[in-house]
Image (cartoon, rainbow, N blue to C red):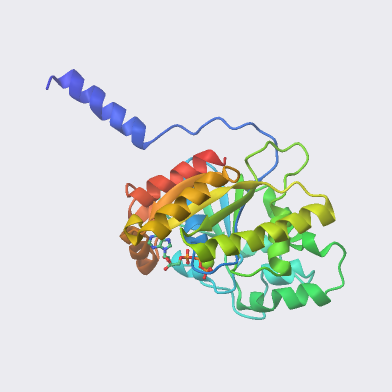
């Protein structure tokens, strides 16, 4: 191959691997992605982490909020959870913050993200969050997460919330946080819902949709479904998997942002306590996470 042709090919492949940051309209409003489903084990944490990494790789300053007291997200990224009784998002949401929330934020040290990927770690006190919000003397309880995170918003382009598998007050506060704000474009902030291609996932989705509907009606909010991620998909599971996938696609709104297979790299990254996009930047799942991020930013 002539030298010039070889050079051109190398440049092309480098450009493909290192796309220039896309132009985004400057609205001054932080993008908020709420990764949510009360059904457990569907991939909320995997999708929240993967999408946040893809956004950070693409040039955005991203805060990943480990909003699940199980702390899986913190653990998987090698970040210490906050000890019970110490300052945490939970205390800030209940108006009992001891210091500044930004002091609890941990930066993921990886050359790939150039200090743009950050985590607000979980705290086991979150297991009591629903009860604490219920008894706290505060107005507009659904706004508890928004009030707590507001001081951090100016430091980030996107905030991604990894929700717990529950449908209580804390989840309402997350849905509220993702509502469309005045002056905000469509398709940027809202809910990303990982689902499985099986019937119990459809039942769980219907319950979540009911909850969202009540919040919309009761509080007059604009709450957007950014889309579904059909996760852990394996067509070898037969007609239940293939027909469920068809039904998810037939919904149309919310649209299916991606179909992600049951892939080994995800489990490897968790075991290594390393970001997926650093562990296996070119695997199908990393490519899928970038595709999701592109559609919602
Ligand atoms: N596409 C995938 N391929 C292989 N393993 C996956 C994939 N997505 C998630 N997993 C693994 O499946 C398990 C459950 O995923 P994850 O923790 O993201 O679900 P979750 O909805 O956050 O669960 P929980 O409701 O407990 O918070 C984890 O071990 C995760 O690493
Ligand atoms: Mg999780």
Camera sees residue 164: yes
Question: Residue 53, percent across and down?
Answer: 47, 51
Q: Is residue 234 left or right of residue 74?
A: left
Question: Residue 209, percent across and down?
Answer: 67, 57
Q: Quadrant of residue 142?
A: bottom right
Q: Is residue 9 left or right of residue 268?
A: left
Question: Residue 296, percent across and down?
Answer: 56, 42
| Nearer-the-camera pick, 183 or 39 | 39
In the rendered image of this protein, does residue 289 appear above or below residue 79?
Answer: above
Of the 4 image quadrants, the one containing the N terminus is: top left
Q: Quadrant of residue 69?
A: bottom right
Extreme left residue here? 1
Q: Quadrant of residue 132?
A: bottom right
| Nearer-the-camera pick, 191 or 205 | 205
Camera sees residue 114: no
Q: Count the marks: how many?
A: 0
Question: Residue 171, percent across and down?
Answer: 68, 64
Q: Is residue 3 left or right of residue 264?
A: left
Of the 4 image quadrants, the one containing the C terminus is: top right
Give the residue at x 60% y 68%: 164
Give the residue at x 77% y 58%: 214
Give the residue at x 32% y 46%: 282
């Amino acid at each position: 191959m002539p030298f010039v042709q070889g050079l051109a090919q190398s440049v092309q492949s480098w450009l493909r691997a290192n796309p220039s940051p896309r132009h985004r309209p400057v609205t001054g409003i932080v993008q908020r992605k709420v990764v949510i489903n009360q059904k457990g084990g569907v991939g909320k944490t995997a999708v929240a982490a993967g999408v946040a990494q893809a956004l950070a790789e693409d040039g955005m300053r991203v805060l990943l909020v480990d909003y699940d007291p199980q702390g899986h997200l913190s653990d998987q990224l090698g970040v210490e959870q906050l000890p019970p009784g110490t300052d945490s998002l939970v205390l800030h949401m209940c108006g009992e913050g001891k210091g500044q929330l930004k002091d609890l934020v941990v930066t993921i040290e990886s050359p790939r993200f150039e200090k743009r990927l950050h985590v607000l770690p979980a705290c086991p006190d979150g297991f009591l969050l629903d009860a604490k919000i219920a008894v706290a003397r505060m107005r507009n309880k659904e706004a508890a997460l928004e009030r707590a995170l507001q001081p951090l918003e100016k430091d980030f382009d996107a905030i991604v919330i990894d929700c717990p598998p529950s449908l209580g007050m804390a989840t309402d506060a997350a849905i509220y946080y993702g509502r469309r704000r005045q002056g905000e474009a469509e398709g940027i902030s809202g809910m990303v819902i990982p689902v499985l291609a099986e019937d119990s996932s459809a039942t769980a989705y219907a319950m979540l949709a009911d909850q969202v509907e009540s919040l919309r009606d009761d509080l007059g909010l604009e709450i957007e479904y950014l889309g579904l991620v059909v996760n852990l998909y394996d067509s070898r599971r037969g007609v239940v998997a293939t027909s469920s996938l068809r039904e998810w696609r037939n919904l149309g709104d919310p649209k299916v942002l991606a179909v992600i297979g049951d892939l080994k790299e995800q489990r490897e990254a968790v075991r290594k306590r390393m970001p997926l996009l650093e562990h296996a930047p070119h695997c199908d799942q990393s490519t899928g996470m970038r595709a999701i991020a592109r559609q919602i930013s």
